[in-house]
Image: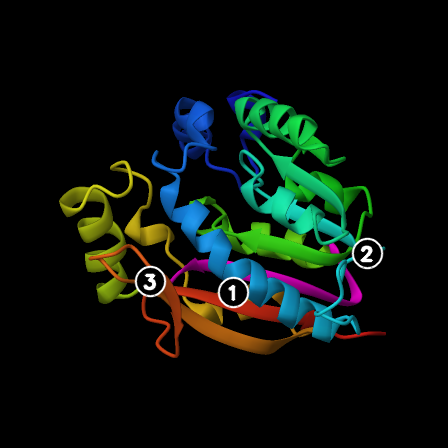
Amino acid sequence: MNREHLTGTGIDPAEVAYFERLAHRWWDTAGPFWPLHRLNALRLDYLRDRAAAALGRDPRADLPFAGLAVLDIGCGGGLLSEAVARLGAALVGIDVTEKNLRVARLHAQGSGLAIDYRLAEAGQLAAAGEQFDLVLNMEVVEHVEQRGLFLEQCARLVRPGGVMVVSTINRTWAAGLMAILGAEYLLRWLPRGTHHYRKLVRPEEVTAGLGAEFRCLHRTGVRVNPFNRHFSFTPWMGVNYMLVMQRMAV
């Protein structure tokens, strides 16, 4: 899939080119994706506990996601995909950047994990009628150009009774100051241009985009301490936040 093939979709070709340039750095814990490495340590427990409970699984089991079909949208180099696969999930990871997927496949092979990585968009899987018990929509929606289309496609990928977890950045003045000006330009935690304010997404825009079939089971803000780079949960959702959304059963 090249950038010309993305015309008319919810994917922004400029975003694809940006992540292509960084693909080789995914598993470097001190590189540009260090926030995702640290965030994974926090959100994996959250995913296991909230999703398992919603899907009738025991979150304390060794493999709480055993037998579940899980989709990781915008899987990148596979950081979250591998962590969730280790919980027993039959995992499909999709991305629109071939370089990311090459990194993900090689790392999964070296880790002894069988993960189905595909060069694909959410809309392609939705058009094919594929559905999953759990859909991970993490740090993706703030990078797409056509948010409404993207969320509608993602909603179709969740089976009735299934769950989608969305993690993104709120469109607030605080997020503009902290997530863009602070993280990218002052602290230089992220490469400049990682985020664009107009693409940031308010929680109500996510819920509206998924549609009336979805109900919110839980929501939380996520904060980072600028002094020790420690991530933690917070009731305040003014910058980073996560939503656990369940599609109502027929």
Residue type indicated by callout 2: Ala
Q: Residue 66 carries which label?
A: 2
| Residue at which label 1 appears | 206
Q: Nearer the viewer, residue 134 or 210?
A: 134
- CA distance separating discs 1 and 3: 12 Å
Location of residue 48 by image quarter: bottom right
Chain-order first, disc 2 or disc 3: 2
Identify the residue shown where x is 22% and y is 65%: 173
Identify the residue shown where x is 56% and y is 41%: 74
Q: Are marks 2 and 3 in contact (CB under 8 Å)?
A: no
Q: Is residue 71 above or below residue 214?
A: above
Q: Quadrant of the C terminus?
A: bottom right
Q: Is residue 160 magenta?
A: yes
| Residue at which label 3 appears | 171
- CA distance separating discs 2 and 3: 36 Å
In the rendered image, residue 184, in percent from the top left (x then y), is placed at: 23, 44
Question: Nearer the observer, disc 1 or disc 2?
Answer: 2
Location of residue 194 by image quarter: top left
Element on which disc 3 rests: loop
- CA distance separating discs 1 and 2: 28 Å
Identify the residue shown where x is 63% and y is 23%: 106
Query: Horizontal placement of 217 versus 40: left or right?
Result: right
In the rendered image, residue 128, in percent from the top left (x then y), is placed at: 81, 42
How many C-alpha atoms fall within 10 Å of the one at disc 3: few (<14), some, or many (≥20)?
A: many
Element on which disc 2 rests: loop
> Which segment is the magenta one?
157-171
Chain-order first, disc 1 or disc 2: 2
Q: Nearer the viewer, residue 204 or 72?
A: 72
Q: Do the residues labelled 1 and 3 touch (CB within 8 Å)?
A: no
